[in-house]
Amino acid sequence: MNIEWLSIGFVLCMLLIAMCVIKLIEKNTKIHAELKRKLLHMTMGLIMLTFPYVFHNVLSVGILAVIALAILVLLKHTKLKEGLGTVLYSVDRESLGEIFFVISVFLIFYLSKGDKVLYSIPILILTFADSAAALIGKNYGKKNLAELNEDAKSIEGSFIFFMVAFVATLVPLLLFTQVGREETLIIATIVGFNVALVEMISHSGNDNLLIPLTTYAFLVTHMGLGVEQLRINLIILGVIFILVTIANRVKAWSKLALVETLVVGYLTITLYGIYAIIPPLILFLTVMRFPKVTEKEQHNLYDARIIETNVILGIAICGIVAITGWKAEFFMIYSLVYSMHLAINTFVRLKYYFNLSEIDSIILSFAKGLCFIFLPSLVIQNLVFHKLPSLPMIVLMVICLFISCFMIYIQKRKVEKEEISIKNGYMHTEIVLVLTAIICFIQYFNIV
């Protein structure tokens, strides 16, 4: 496989010229720091749109990505930050957006496998919709949906994002594919709406990764569907939206947390199947029930990032299933993830808000995860796929569920007062990730 050094050099030169031009504009005008970033963002996006025409193998794009990441590190952590680096790093907030941008372009180039439409639509949305939403929201946004430590998101910016994403999907599908007109209209609506919601719940620059990947996922899963199924999917999206709107009365969740549940619901149904919505649905319906919310808990507010820690592994498994088609093989692992999250959250509630002993908290939280999600999922597995994991595998999963309760007990031994925080949320996710990885390893190599 030949490395296309000439193309790599061309792209790097174009990016350097773009940064120098924006730096020159910065010196001669009072351009806002965010506007500088978005100008470079759009310029980079336009250059990346040429990739299917200037690159013919993934290795060359991978080498370009590594070189670009190295340059970004140098710009951020050396004296260059005060020179050319001000184009990217003069905003007063922590962001990994430029890193995620490079990674996402490489991933979309790899996944699209030369399909120009599947490559261009995610990059178009990342380039123009994201920039338009940020600039309109910052300058004209009045209705901020964010609460607590969530990144500011305005209705005005999100509406602009939807409109640009809708057009960026509609036009290429109409001009360069054989997809019918009604199908194109529905796909553009679904993609624009969902990706706008993804942008709303993104933070720390991870929208540069999430926007193109979710756009690609929606395109791949919807472009081959007939008009009847697309209509059904649109109705499902509408129903989920109505249910989440009703759930807005739940004061314990922030508005963006409810937006995240909408995205998770539709992504789960689209990537895995409608039956796969049951485990996360049970988690969200029962986590603050059985037992009822105490007076001390009534003042807690769960934001989008807390919700994110509970669903990120489940969505990752949905993505793996969409790529591999291993629905039956992964369903009980997928359900175990949500069982462990329910058990861990219940342990925290029982120990810190009901003042139960550690042993009682472990036993009751394990029983809740087992009875509310794991055992019902075994029934679903049998009904949908007509086969169950081996008995040793089921026993091992149950043991992992119990271990998750014991591990959170170990983590919390010296904690006198629990706080609702993103740090604690990811601590829970780390426990679930380790145990899930062990189960996947054992299943893949048929150890039991």
Image: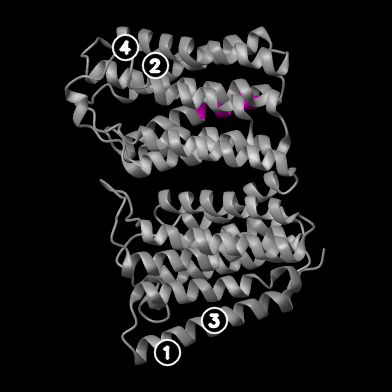
User: At numbered mark 1, what does the secondary structure look like: helix, strand or loop?
Assistant: helix
- Is 297 or 104 nearer to us in this picture? 297
Please report contact status of discs 3 and 2: CB closer than 8 Å, yes or no: no
Q: How busy is the neighbourhood of tag 2: few (under 14 within 10 Å), some, or many (20 plus)?
A: many
Whole-percent x, y for residue 382 in the image: 67, 12
Q: Is residue 329 left or right of residue 254?
A: right
Q: Label 1: which residue?
A: 24
Cα distance in 3D space between marks 2 and 1 = 58 Å
Cα distance in 3D space between marks 1 and 4 = 62 Å
Residue 173 falls in which quadrant of the image?
bottom right
Q: Is residue 441 left or right of residue 345?
A: right
Residue type, label 3 = Leu
Compared to 84, does 305 lie above or below?
Answer: above
- Is 232 or 268 nearer to us in this picture? 232
Whole-percent x, y for residue 74 in the image: 46, 70
Query: Which numbered circle lies on residue 406?
Result: 2
Residue at figure coordinates x 72%, y 36% from the top left: 324
Magenta residues, as a range?
434-441
User: At numbered mark 4, what does the secondary structure look like: helix, strand or loop?
Assistant: helix
Residue at figure coordinates x 72%, y 13% from the top left: 387
Let me know if residue 269 appears in the view: yes
Residue at figure coordinates x 64%, y 27% from the top left: 441
Q: Earlier in the sequence, mark 1 or mark 3?
A: 3
Q: Is residue 378 magenta?
A: no
Q: Label 3: which residue?
A: 16
Q: How busy is the neighbourhood of tag 3: few (under 14 within 10 Å), some, or many (20 plus)?
A: few
Residue type, label 1 = Leu
Compared to 197, does 413 lie above or below?
Answer: above
For discs 4 and 2, the disc positioned in front in the rendered view: 4
Q: Earlier in the sequence, mark 1 or mark 4?
A: 1
